[in-house]
Image: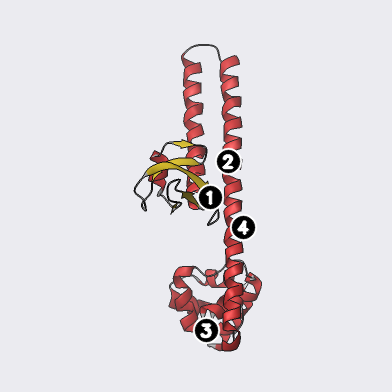
Amino acid sequence: MDQLKIGKFIAECRKNAGLTQKQLAEKLGITDRAVSKWETGKALPDSSIMLELCRILGITVNDLLNGEKISMENNNQVNEQLLIEMSKEIERKNKTVWTSMWVIMGVSITGLFAGLAIAAFIIPEGIWQIVAIIGLCAVFLIPCFYALKLEVSVGAYKCKNCGYEIVPTYTQALNAMHMGTTRYLKCPECKKRSWCKKVLDKDK
């Protein structure tokens, strides 16, 4: 999706409707700064207000996401192309989140071992060395929790028994035994527990 094109289209439709950015924002219950970001291509409208935005501007969601009015004759072809582009965009975002998760874990583990080495060889044996080690381990848990949040936010966990793709809550993933990104989960489809492998894309 071309955000700049969509932004220009929103601005054009808003002006055609005789609305200022502030008036459109008030109708949607948001700030005029958000509308400005759409129109300059810095952001896209949130899905929760997209339908209302289209109703106010007198356009369809297809029109909005394509950044132009779509004729009925070309509607099916445009729909297919739009779905493909949205799928690619989701895939790119998932890969970015996935990479971020591994970077966070890599940096955290490196920092933990470096800190433990310093605590072991520089701080004299005794209570302060123990406090330092416990403190380092506690601090290490913070990025771990965040990395898990990123892990859960993309893709799904594939049930080993029936192939169903499980999307657990953060708490369910946190409480599940795991080996890397493979977690021991109960499948809501077959009701069995198994080691479910993380998959970013459907049918993989």
Nearer the viewer's eye, disc 4 or disc 1? 1
Mark closest to the chain's N terminus, 1 or 3: 3
Q: Nearer the viewer, residue 32 or 46?
A: 46
C-alpha span from label 4 to label 1 = 14 Å
The residue pinned by badge 1 equals: 199
Number of other residues with Cα within 10 Å of mark 4, as a class: few under 14, some 14 to 19, many 20 or more: few
Mark closest to the chain's N terminus, 4 or 1: 4
Q: Residue at x 52, y 84 (%)?
A: 59
C-alpha span from label 3 to label 2 = 42 Å
Number of other residues with Cα within 10 Å of mark 1, as a class: few under 14, some 14 to 19, many 20 or more: some
Number of other residues with Cα within 10 Å of mark 2, as a class: few under 14, some 14 to 19, many 20 or more: some
From this viewpoint, is residue 188 visible? yes
Nearer the viewer's eye, disc 2 or disc 4? 4
Label 2 residue SS:
helix
Number of other residues with Cα within 10 Å of mark 3, as a class: few under 14, some 14 to 19, many 20 or more: some
Q: Residue at x 58, y 41 (%)?
A: 104
Label 1 residue SS:
strand
Q: In the image, what residue type sits under mark 4? A: Arg
Q: Residue at x 58, y 48 (%)?
A: 98
Q: In the image, what residue type sits under mark 3? A: Ile
Quadrant position of the N terminus in the picture = bottom right
Mark closest to the chain's N terminus, 3 or 2: 3
Q: Nearer the viewer, residue 122 or 44?
A: 44
160 up-or-down from 29: above or below = above
C-alpha span from label 2 to label 1 = 19 Å
The numbered disc on residue 104 is 2
Label 3 residue SS:
loop
